């Protein structure tokens, strides 16, 4: 009986540790998915606000709204800022270039990022 316990107890301990890691990995993946969805949602909202403000004669309040929506997108991007989007850029760099510098290539990269992570319908 002692011999069986010497074998069973370490095996059960390993199973418990592995189950704990697996559970934590699932939560990390859920968290990451939620962060990506939030970012892509905020990016789409910024695109919509920017496009609406780009009409014939935008009101000053339109620019304020675009700035506020851009700030929300920047905040949503922060936990993901180091993810790569191609061209040697990170998500953070591409987001800043798209929103601050009207860089259409950078905007294309962040939109493609949203498509690659499964949230292409949230952007324009």
Image (tube, helix red, strand yellow):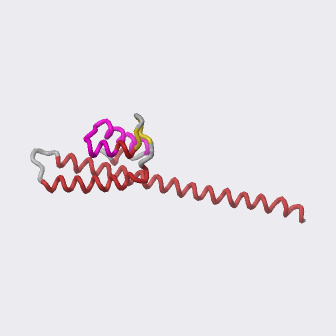
Question: Which quarter of the rendering shows the C terminus?
Answer: top left
Residue at screen point 52% across, 55% down = 28
- Residue 17, compared with residue 91, is above or below; it is below
Q: Is residue 98 magenta?
A: yes
| Residue found at the very far top of the displayed protein | 87
Dominant secondary structure (helix, strand or loop) of the stretch shown in magenta? helix
Residue at screen point 57% across, 54% down = 25
Q: Which residues are magenta?
A: 95-117
Q: How many marks?
A: 0
Q: Give the quarter of the image for residue 106.
A: top left
Where is residue 96 drawn, in percent x and y?
Answer: 32, 45
| Residue found at the very far bottom of the displayed protein | 1
Question: Which quarter of the rendering shows the N terminus?
Answer: bottom right
- Residue 86, compared with residue 92, is above or below; it is above
Where is residue 110 drawn, in percent x and y?
Answer: 36, 42
Q: Give the quarter of the image for residue 19.
A: bottom right
Decide if residue 48 is on the left or right side of residue 19. Answer: left
Where is residue 123 drawn, in percent x and y?
Answer: 32, 46
Residue at screen point 42% across, 36% down = 88
Camera-side residue: 71 or 6?
Answer: 71
Camera-side residue: 42 or 90?
Answer: 90
Q: Is residue 78 magenta?
A: no
Residue at screen point 44% across, 46% down = 82
Where is residue 112 drawn, in percent x and y?
Answer: 37, 39
């Amino acid at each position: 009986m002692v011999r069986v316990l010497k074998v069973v107890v370490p095996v059960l301990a390993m199973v418990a540790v592995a189950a704990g890691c697996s559970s934590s990995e699932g939560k990390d993946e859920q968290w990451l998915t939620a962060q990506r969805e939030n970012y892509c949602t905020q990016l789409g909202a910024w695109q919509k606000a920017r496009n609406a403000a780009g009409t014939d004669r935008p009101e000053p309040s339109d620019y304020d709204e675009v700035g506020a929506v851009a700030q929300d997108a920047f905040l949503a991007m922060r936990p993901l800022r180091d993810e790569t989007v191609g061209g040697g850029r990170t998500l953070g760099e591409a987001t800043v270039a798209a929103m601050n510098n009207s860089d259409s290539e950078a905007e294309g990269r962040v939109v493609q990022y949203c498509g690659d992570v499964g949230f292409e319908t949230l952007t324009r």
